[in-house]
Amino acid sequence: LVEVDNGLFARFCYRILRTMAEDSAVLKSRGELIVRKLCDGVDAELVFATAANAVADEQDVSLARRLVRVLNRVLFTSRETRDFRQKLQLDAVHSARPGAANSGAQAVPQLLMQLVRSWFHCPVSTVTLCLWLQWFELAAEITARLVEEVEQGQELQEQLDEFVELLESPVFIRLRFLLLESQRKPFLLHAVLGLVALLPRPKEQALRPRLDVVQAGLLLDKFGFPRGQRSPLPKHVAVEETLGAQFMHRFDAVVDAHGWK
């Protein structure tokens, strides 16, 4: 890593983002490589914090959505971001979960707030990030909005394809294991099943083994614990009027800006 002036580096990143904005072919063909090289040469946390601010300031919502997709893929597929994504998860686990009963207990780190708000431009990427952070309540609520409100189109299907690939990747092995505990983590199950419902049948079959694992986990719970001690899977996930509600108000505003409804 090299020492850099944060202000100078921010201007440099903004210039790169503007170059990609002016030439969509650069973003599509080289965007991930550019972000990876920046993370490798400087610092992944600084790169993503700068990029999140740039996305938040971007007036072209279509460009913002494409940038988030690139950033999301780099975050969850690159060796250059491995330490950074582990830090994000650790910070999230030790802070309040938006929408959870303890959502007012501890402050959420500013960087997590920045990332999630910027990721709203790409809802499926937002769900992926929330699942990684183990913010299952927020993931379930956003999935419910996707099912009920967001227009189903080709780009959404492409985003869902990326989600399936990430869910099946080694990075998300811990999340797949948590699906065995779906009786105790109903919001995780709610989010995953919601996204599966949006998939066309051939893609849905790709996740069928995972759903079989969920069923096996529920059977294990049935034989291991009295059913009366478990809460049923909620039909609708309610978000408290605290941090979770603030996130969802912002998400709705971004959805309106994109005209997805």
Image (cartoon, helix red, strand yellow):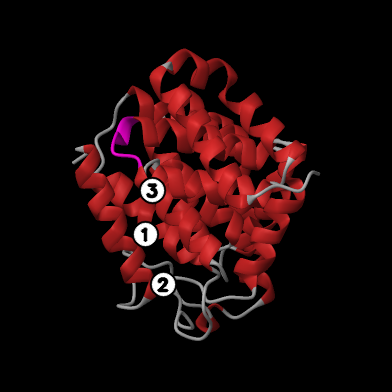
Highlighted range, magenta: 58-62
Give the secondary structure at mark 2. loop
Amino acid type, label 3: Ala
Disc 1 versus disc 2: distance between alpha carbons?
9 Å
**Is residue 9 visible in the rendered structure shown here?**
yes
Q: Nearer the viewer, residue 131 or 88?
A: 88
* Residue at 40%, 28% in the rendered image: 157
Q: Which residue is mark 2?
A: 99
Which residue lies most toward the bottom here? 105
**Is residue 190 visible in the rendered structure shown here?**
no
Select label 3 or label 1 by which is in front: 3
Select label 3 or label 2 by which is in front: 3
Tell me if residue 70 comes above or below residue 46 in the rendering: above
Q: Nearer the viewer, residue 137 or 248?
A: 248
Tell me if residue 83 comes above or below residue 107 in the rendering: above
Q: Which residue is mark 3?
A: 56
Which image quadrant: the N terminus? top right
Labels 3 and 1: the sequence-earlier one: 3
Give the secondary structure at mark 3. helix
Percent from the top left, x then y, of residue 49? 55, 52
Disc 3 versus disc 2: distance between alpha carbons?
22 Å
